[in-house]
Image: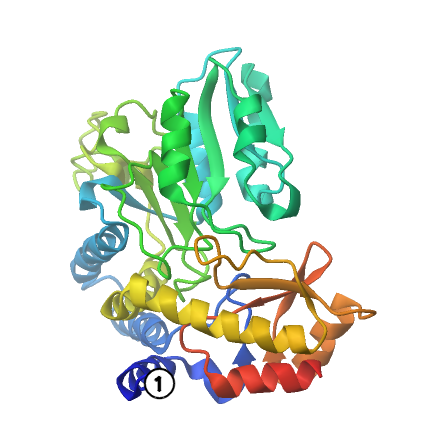
Amino acid sequence: MSNTSIDRWAAFRVEMPVTKTWAYFDHAAVAPLSGRAQRAILAWAEEYAANGDAHSTTYSREVGRIRELGAKLLGAPKEEVAHVANTTAGINLVAEGYPWRPGDNVVFPANEFPANQYPWMNLAALGVEARRVECPDGRIDWGRMAQACDSRTRIIALSWVGYATGYRVDLDEAVQFARERGAHLFVDAIQGLGVFPIDVQRTPIDFLAADGHKWLLGPEGAGLFYLRREHLDFLRPINLGWHSVAHSSDYARIELNLRANAARYEGGTWNMPGILGLGGSLELLLEHGASAIGERILQVTDQICERLTKLGATIASDRNPRHASGIVSFTLPGVDPNTVRRHCLDRGVVLNNRAGKIRVSAHAYNDDADVERLVATLT
């Protein structure tokens, strides 16, 4: 690795206060805030404590600017992006707003995170069948997925990166699969957005949602929702509020004239500190670029896998560069994952457990010292 590259990631590391105390490998659960997110939230708190909403228009403009940052991250026009409270909220915008008919179905892997299962299962009262497809080892089995589809399949729902083993789906392949079956594609992008490149104009996903508290290094309760422009009037808006209409500042005018962009799905008052914090981290990530961040993350996790294998660990994650991610799932012979997590926390190393395995999830700012600390603690 060149000195320029090392300096680049050292500069990223400076932006992460957590590094002063922890070797942090749990970004797939809840990430630490970036320093920029922290400062943005503190500045908002100080402003509102001192002045209330006297300067609220300034912050309203900031919300629009941060929506544009999210759009840039996705390669989307800003009109196709909305702020949401979390990934679940974005999924439910599609699940509850889609023009279902009795007998329709939605197909998704059975090992999806619960947030990408329950909203689809909840459609049974509308006569919509949720078809859960067993995909062994966390990998997408397109053959099994195809067997579950028929002429009434309306949506294919899947995660860009699986939360348990970190399997990263080829989104171009997923789009082609959905198009060949005349279905729309929904992507839960929470485990990949910001750290792997995506261009929704080149890869025409229909719907996408992601919260900001994992790889985006933002606070909980502030995420992004994307839909293609042609679906704007197709997807019935739910949770409508004063902010959903074009004349949102004219409170005395009651007219259901919806905004001509994705902001119509934002409904009511924004989570202002959450969005501002997310904006700080989006700026940081965009400065480095998702392509470079993704390459760095794969370098760090490859190094971790190499060291873990020497310890006798069995790696459960697919490390093919096409499908690898920042998540490494593994087992150590004769060792209970819960015991490992407690042992590591006591020694300043943060990791987690999922599906009976130990899960490490590294970001671009993790360095050799973090990896050494992890390996020494596991040893």
Assess disc 1: are there few (<14), some (14-19) or many (≥20) residues with their C-alpha within 10 Å of its C-alpha.
some
Residue 129 at x, y = what percent?
58, 20
Outermost residue to the top: 102
**Which residue corresponds to mark 1?**
10
Q: Closest to the observer: 329 or 100?
A: 329
Vertical comparison of 159 with 359: above or below: above
Most foreground residue, 111 or 346: 111
Q: How many badges with numbers are in the image?
A: 1
Residue in the foreground of this view, choosing between 218 and 26:
26
- When the figure is inspected, residue 125 is found, relative to residue 91, above or below; the finding is above
Give me the residue at 24% from left, 52% from top.
Answer: 67
Q: Nearer the viewer, residue 227 or 38?
A: 227
Please, what secondary structure does the residue beneath circle 1 have? helix
Amino acid type for the residue under numbered disc 1? Ala
Q: Is residue 245 left or right of residue 30?
A: left
For the N terminus, give its image quadrant.
bottom left
Give the colouring mode of the picture. Answer: rainbow
Residue at 74%, 70% in the rendered image: 332
Tell me residue 363's x, y (percent).
Answer: 45, 71
Is any part of residue 85 visible from this angle?
Answer: no
Confirm whether residue 258 shows in the render.
yes
Q: Quadrant of residue 218?
A: bottom left
Question: Height in image: 183 above or below 212?
Answer: above
Residue 12 percent across, percent down from the top left: 33, 79
Q: Where in the figure is residue 23, as x and y percent of width and height? A: 54, 81
Say left or right for 320 vs 261. Answer: right
Residue positioned 27% across, 65% down in the render: 289
User: Residue at 44% of width from left, 49% of height from top?
Assistant: 86
